[in-house]
Amino acid sequence: MRWTNQPTARPINGQRCHDRVIMRVKFEATDAAGRVHKRSSKSHIYSHCVVVHFAAHPPSKLWPEGVAACSHAEWVQSCELAERKASRWRTKPGVEAIEVLKAGQV
């Protein structure tokens, strides 16, 4: 059953909550390959993006077609946290490169 007095869509840019306006803030960072990584949040302000590039894996019994190289982005709120995350990723096998990027607000 659908209630007719409830709105069908909510605003994307902000919501009103107890006389406060919660705005969605969008961030983006561009890595060395020119790929843009995007993130949006209503509760956090991100200053850095850690991009982890994984190496491709050859075909095996488990993955007959192999695994293509890929990237993973993690967003953090300070430079210190970004360096800490990057140092943890450096110890993992299969990590080809790590980039710590400064994020910009869009």
Image: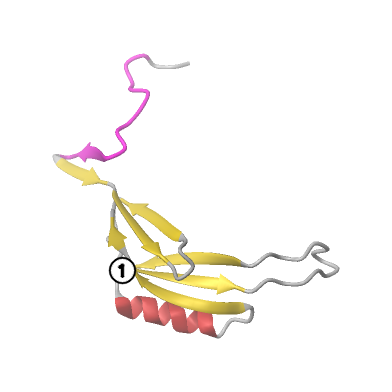
For the point 55% across and 66% down, the residue is 71
Residue numbers of the magenta segment:
4-18
Q: Which residue is the site of mark 1? A: 77
Number of numbered discs present?
1
For the point 80% across and 62% down, the residue is 65
Q: Position of residue 48 (x, y in %)?
A: 34, 69
Q: Position of residue 27 (x, y in %)?
A: 33, 57
Q: Position of residue 85 (x, y in %)?
A: 43, 77
Mark 1 lies on a secondary structure that is loop
For the point 81% across and 69% down, the residue is 59
Viewer-closest of 4 and 99: 99
Please state if 74 lies on the left or on the right of 63 as rendered. left
Q: Position of residue 83 (x, y in %)?
A: 38, 81
Query: Does residue 16 belong to the magenta stretch?
Result: yes
For the point 52% across and 65% down, the residue is 72
The residue under label 1 is which amino acid type? Gln
Q: Main secondary structure of the magenta part?
A: loop
Query: Colour mode?
Result: secondary structure
